[in-house]
Amino acid sequence: MIRVLAPAGLIGLALGLSVLPASALTTKECSVKYQAAKQANTLGGKTWNDFRKAECGADAQPAAATTTVPNPVAPGAAKPSPTAAPAPAPSPAPSATAATAGSAGFPARVDPKYASEPAGKQRMHTCLDSYNAAKAAGTLGSLKWIQKGGGYYSECNKRLKG
């Protein structure tokens, strides 16, 4: 019985997928198109759902690419000789955490009001108080409580441990 139903299920799935519109935009493509319309003020008061239904259906076209490739040689400028040494590679930019960690204030020591808690909780609550104060003051920049590569909590916890 199962041997008969499995192939039938696969055939049904294949037929069901063949009915989907081939030219419908993906959610990501639709989002790009929505953001472009939002920037150009051409939404006409449509919400995301209204826009998605009207503009990203079966006959929709993706948003035109707005990025241009810069000309490496300006008009009238001399072309570099093939024997010239290549330009040195730019140094990698510092991580976002390192860049914003300097602007956010971190506590120097654990707050005494958390003395009755375990060491990890003392650090966490002290860091959370400091984070909320920095957030209210607007000094966090792009730093978040927890983020990939080390957020505010990670940096604060390191400083309080060491």
Image (tube, rainbow, N blue to C red):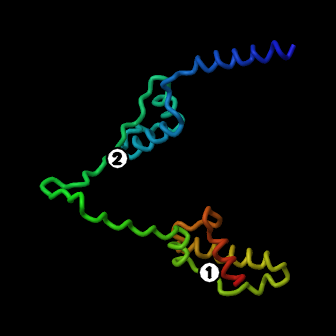
Of 116 and 118, which appears nearest the observer? Answer: 118
Q: Is residue 122 above or below residue 16?
A: below
**Element type at mark 2:** loop
Tag in front: 2 or 1 = 2
Of 11 and 34, which appears nearest the observer? Answer: 11
Q: Left or right: 30 with respect to 123? A: left
Tell which circle, 2 or 1, labels the residue nearer the N-terminal end: 2
Location of residue 79 by image quarter:
bottom left
Q: Is residue 48 above or below residue 119?
A: above
Residue type of the residue flagged with mark 1 = Phe
Residue furthest to the left = 76
Q: Left or right: 73 with respect to 146? A: left
Mark carried by residue 53: none
Q: Which residue is mark 1?
A: 106
Determine the CA span between mark 2 and mark 1.
Answer: 40 Å
* Relative image position of residue 152 (x, y in whole percent): 62, 71
Residue type of the residue flagged with mark 2 = Thr
Mark 2 Cα shell of 10 Å, populated few (<14), some (14-19), many (≥20): few
Of 123 and 82, which appears nearest the observer? Answer: 82
Question: Which quarter of the rendering shows the C terminus?
Answer: bottom right
* Relative image position of residue 91 (x, y in whole percent): 42, 69
Of 25 and 82, which appears nearest the observer? Answer: 82
Q: Which residue is mark 2?
A: 67
Q: Residue at x 80, y 15 (%)?
A: 5
